[in-house]
Amino acid sequence: MAPRFLIPDRDCTLYAPGLYRVQSRILAGLFLAAISFSQGADSGPLLTFDNSPMGTEEKPLVFRSYFPNPDLEPEVLKRHGQGNPTPRYSAKTGLLSDERMDQAIPGIPAAIGVNAGKTLSYVWDTTECRLLYAWVNGFLDMEAYWGEPTRGSRKSNDYVPRLYGQLFYKATGANPLRVNGENLPEDLKYLYHSRKSTHPEFTYQAGADRTISTMVTPGESAQTAIVSFRSSNAADKLSYEAPNTAFEILENNSGSLKVLLRPNAAETFTGFKKQEVKITEANAKAGEKLYQMFGCAACHTTDGSRNHGPTFQGLSGSVRKFGDDEITADSDYLRESIREPNAKHVPEYPVGMMPAYPLSEVQIDSLVLYIQTLK
């Protein structure tokens, strides 16, 4: 079977066919490539063989592949099947092993990933017909899938790319969209996506008499997303129910609905490689490496600019106000903030965004020393 690449959109849209199984359930192969093409001087940058492909807000990258599952609830993926172990296949003998088994590879098939630069990445699932998760400051690390850019050598039996960036939203529970007060029918059928505007719009059949189209775009505030729904039946009343997610209804018209999603998750992903930071004695240089490795830059700048967490520049020794209390950001304060991110909530910043990282004392001390250098 030869690889198939479809380019329905004008800009860099890549469909990466995934895993194929022949009738005997043997893993037949994975066909991947990168496409580089141009349609004139204004077509934008080429999509090349890059471990970390990225789009822009003006020209989002649409990417169909297997995607990671960041611990989504079973209810979210209830229409997905369960992979089963299969006997190990030998290409040399052409036989299946009687003893060795290959386990199912964890991942979400039939999904579409979209990257609009650092402001928003998300995965939309064509099986569940819903937004699964969204993140910022990165997209996918394709090294396991594609190999190194200069040498190839993809990772054996590893077909799922890695997330990198700051995950801020995960779907929970049943599909949150309601039509005329009712849950969506069970027999949803994905139809297609199109680009009537810059961002893709996903359309699926929701019963015999309607289709629903969904578009996801970045919100104005950091780590937010706007989800717009449109029914083919202009008389439909659409509503949204998501008990475990903070959201705001921006527009609610006959046959359409626009929802602003706020963060309900705080997870950092650093891609395929984990940089080894061996520390025998706390030092600022090691702290800088840890800052990069754990994605601290997703929330905390080092140049004084505002992000969705306080900047590290000038933090050490500054006075922080918590109600009527004033506390100096000394080394003890910094250590506490790293160990227990929610111990003291700095006003004007989102609550609960930073997870508690599994850091040793020498790693924490190294981070503190690095922060103290950022005057």
Image (cartoon, grey):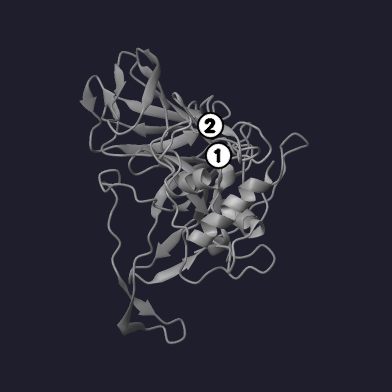
Question: Amino acid type of disc 2?
Answer: Arg
Question: Amino acid type of disc 1?
Answer: Ala
Q: Is residue 256 left or right of residue 173?
A: right
Residue 218: tell me if it is visible: yes
Quarter of the image for residue 141 reads bottom right
Residue 155 at x, y = what percent? 53, 69
| Residue for point 23% across, 33% down | 185
Quarter of the image for residue 99 reads bottom left
Quarter of the image for residue 311 reads top right
- For label 2, the SS is strand
Q: Mark 1 near mark 2, Cβ–Cβ under 8 Å?
A: yes
Residue 179 at x, y = what percent? 27, 23
Dividing the image into 4 quarters, which one contains the C terminus? top right
Residue 329 - label? 1
Residue 6: tell me if it is visible: no
User: Mark 1 to mark 2: distance in Å?
Assistant: 7 Å
Residue 320 - label? 2
Instruction: Looking at the image, tell me whether mark 1 or mark 2 is earlier in sequence order.
Output: 2
Label 1, residues with CA under 10 Å away: few <14, some 14-19, many ≥20: some
Q: Up-down: is 275 above or below 180?
A: below
